[in-house]
Every structure is written in C-alpha cells, then in structure tokens.
Image (cartoon, rainbow, N blue to C red):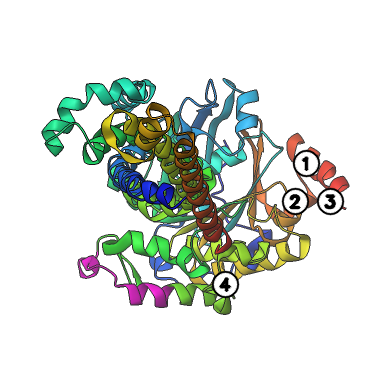
Amino acid sequence: MFHAERPIEAAHQLVSLPSSPLSDSPVKVALSLRHLGKRYAEQAGSSGRERSPASLETAISAGRPALSDVSLDIERGLVFGIVGRSGAGKSTLLRIAALLEKPDAGVVLYGDSPVQGLSGEALRRARRRVGVVFQSFNLFSARTALGNVAFPLEAAGGSWSPGRSCETDEVCRGRADSRAIRERAIELLELVGLPDKALRPVSRLSGGERQRVAIARALSLEPEILFCDEATSALDPETTRSVLDLIVELRDRLGLTVVMVTHQLEVVRRVCDRVAVLDEGVLAEVLPAGELFRSPSSPEARRLVSGGEAIDA
Amino acid sequence: MRELLLLLVRPLGETVAMIAASTAAASLIGFPLGILLCLIGPGGLHERPRLRAVLDRVVNSLRSFPFVILMILLFPLSRFLIGTSIGTAAAVVPLSIAAAPFVARIVESALADVDRGIVEAAIASGTTPARIMLAILVPEAAPALVSGLTLTVINLVGYSAMAGAIGGGGLGDLAVRYGYQRFRPDVMIAAVAAILVLVEGVQLLGSGLSRRIKASR
C-alpha cells in the first residue's frame, strides 16, 4: 500500500507550517486511514444514515466494494487531494474519514487517537474535531449566515468556550453564553470575508458566499481537519479560485489539515500539496500534486491527467 | 334573513370552539409523536426499528378507524374526561383522538422531507439528535408543518360536522336538525355556506402564513 509518509518534495515551499499550538506536538500525522474496506449497501434505503448523496451511484453498484484496503497517512498542515473517476470511492473515503459513514473494515485515526467504532457522546466529540464542507453547501435555510455559523457553537455548549478548543479542559465546562457565541460567529464570518452579510438569510447569498458561510461553520469549533467534499464543484471558475485561495489561507493561518475530494484537476493543480489517486476503490498512487501532472506513474493517474486535460482545457 | 343569521351565530361559535380545542389537543399529542416517529424511523437520527414498528401500527389503526365508530367507542372516555358524552365539549375528545395520528404523520413526513444534506451538516457538527431535531429540523420544516396543520384544521371542520350530527352541536348539528329534519333548505344552505367560508378562511390563512415563512428565508 502507498503511504503519504515520505516528506513532501515538490510542494514543500507551499507549506508554510502554521503557528498553531498543535504543531508543537510530536504527532505529525493529522489523519490516518488503515486498511479501510467498504461495500456499497446491498439495497438502497436499508439505512438512511449510510445513504450517500450519490445514491443513484450507490444503487447501481450495490454489493460491489466501494473501497478495498485503503491506507493513507495525511501529514498535518497539508492540503491533501483525493481524485478519481466518479464511482472510484473518493466520496465514500472522505465520508468514512469524516465519521459520516462507517467502514466495514479498517481504522480511522485523528492524530494518534482511533475514532472509528465510537457512538453516542464519544462519536459526537470526535466529530467536533473535524469540519466538513459539502458540494451543495447544506446550509440551514431557516437561519441567517450568522445563525449557521453559530449553530455548532450553540450545540457544543459546555465543550466550547471563547478562544480555545476544549476536549479535556476543566476550565471550559461552563456554558458558552450567547454573546460570546455571537462574537465568535462574527469573527468567523470576518475570517471568510463576509462580515457585512451576517444577518442575511442564506438564500440571499451567492454560491461563493454560501460556501464561505459553510466554511466558517465548519471551522467554528476549531477543527484539526477540514474535509471538503467537492466543495467547489458547484461554483463558477472564478468563485472556485477565490474559495480555494481562502481555504489555503485558512490552512496557513489556523494550522489546519485540509482533505479535499474533487474531480476537478484544476483544484489539485491550484492548491493541493499531495494527492491520492483512487481507482475502483483501490488506492492507485499517492504523490506530490505537481508530480501528478509531470510524471504520473500509475495507469489510472495517467488516464486521469490526459483525459482530464482534454475536458478542462 | 335576520332570523337565519341569528340561527347561525351559536352553532358557528360551537364549531369554532370545537375545532380550536381539538386542534390544540391533537397537536399536543401529534407533534411529539410525529417527532418521535421521525427520530426513530428508518434513516432517522436515532433509529429504533422495533419501537417504530409498534407505533406505526398504533398510528395506522387509529387513522383507518371510521370516525363515526371511533366517536361511539369513545363515549366512555368522553364521559370520564368531560363528564358527559353529549355536547360540544364532549365531541372534542373523539375529534382530538382522530386528528392526533393525522398530525403525527404530517409532522413526521414534513421532518423527513428536510434535505438530507442539511441533516448531515448538522450531524457532522457533532450535535445530539434531540438538538438537531429541535434547532434545525423543526425550523427547516416550518412551512410544511404550517401547511400540514392547515390541512388538519380543514379535516377537523369536516369531522366536527359529523360530530355535530350525533349530539356535538355546531354547524353540522344545525344543518341536520333544521335543514333536514325540519325541512328548512335555507338553513341547510346557510350552514353549509358557513362551513365553506370557514374552510376557505383557514386555507387562506394557512397558505399565507406558509408563504410568509418561505419568503422570509
């Protein structure tokens, strides 16, 4: 299996290691996936929680493995891309890593703590360590931009307080009050460049603005990892670029690790440090993003790059 | 004409009171039940297949019960709760019990129709099912909930006329006793017209409110 343990070569300069408190810790790997296996559900509707948005895709390929024996280590501070044809299992991989779906086999670790197989409050606590951004934004339409960003903060209540992420901290047991939540939500909207849109209903925002709100919401609990599931696929090229630049900027400022699934090679070219190529649920290759375009070694990567350029050009 | 209008006043008041009280009672039972059905249902935030199967059975049998028979079967309950099985207050009991499972189904389906992606975003933020339900799903489903409640009220207008016919008072009672038994087609027409106006008014109010909620987003 391919591991992303090697130091990054080409993309090295791009990675300005962030001044986050996390970077002092000896653990260099933000996310480890070990021997993940997953079969598509035998029939759609067996369990709604397992149903991915690509349910048509799932229905067609029922019973066939979506992932087989995928192992990956993703270093802290990277923007890590996952590419592949549709149906290659990249979304499934991300959803398992983000704890939205359970693998049939294998282990997921955030840092050095295993997080798969959890339930109840332990699962919710693990989910609060990561943020997820979706292709269709998935904003709460009954809430304003501010209300969207505030929701995770309100919900985390006792385990969140201004200025710190509290996993074990005794000091931050007290409930975060609504003013602190509001201030923090406004701060987050400023971070994504939308301080003046705070009180707008989300339906009155443009696509790019909506995705920025979604990013602010995903970052509200100061996650270690930001997962982006085709986050820019619904946006026009110019908005895509500005959202991607924002993600890189946030990575630099907050010391995030970003994992993005995409079918747009342009995205990989622009922001990814490393990239994993998936082919029918199997990891074909993990390589520095620059090399994907210069010297892809696996047939799937070569196919992707040549085929992709024909469409993207 | 004046006599006709005077004749309408009391039954109209009774019908409105009957509907208001039974809508309130049915919602009080139906809302939590619908929320529970959605939470524990397939694909719900807290799946409990066996409990769900039991509740499903109960709700379905109550819903498929012919109202006239339900009313008669519930006479003892009305007598126990209200002290009598005749009259407007007594009719509220069967009306509420007939409408509650309907409300539950409406609430359940309104909540289940909320975009799956929105639910997933809430799940991803590490929030408890109860909180996702109350802070996200219920507000997201608000327009559908209002439409569903409107439908409930309109159904109750129909049921209340039936309840009226067997001793519950109200417009249905008026139509039967005066219009039919005393051969007064003018009273019959007036009673039916009043019911139509009532239904139309409720529908307008409900659609308007639902539209207002949608427009504010």
Q: Tag count in the figure?
A: 4
What's the CA distance linking mark 2 and mark 4? 24 Å
Query: Which disc, if any, is residue A304?
Result: 1
Q: Amino acid at mark 2?
A: Leu
Residue B40 seen in render: no
Chain letter behind tag 3: A
Q: Of residues A49 and B81, which is closer to you in this image?
A: B81
Marks 1 & 2, CB-CB < 8 Å contact? yes
Q: Residues within 10 Å of mark 4 (few under 14, many from 20)?
A: many
The range drawn in magenta is A169-184
Which is nearer the N-term, disc 1 or disc 4? 4
Which is nearer the N-term, disc 1 or disc 3? 1
Chain letter behind tag 1: A
What's the CA distance linking mark 2 and mark 3? 8 Å
Q: Are marks 1 and 2 on the same chain?
A: yes
Mark 1 or 3, closer to the camera: 3
Q: Amino acid at mark 4?
A: Val
Query: Could you tell me residue A40's position as x and y percent?
Result: 55, 26
The residue tagged 3 is: A312
Query: Could you tell me residue A180's position as x and y percent?
Result: 34, 76
Q: Residues within 10 Å of mark 1 (few under 14, many from 20)?
A: many
Which is nearer the N-term, disc 1 or disc 2? 2
Q: Of residues B7 and B33, which is closer to you in this image?
A: B7
The residue tagged 2 is: A265
Label 4: state its secondary structure.
loop
Q: Amino acid at mark 3?
A: Asp
Q: Give the residue at x 57% y 72%.
A: A192
The residue tagged 4 is: A192
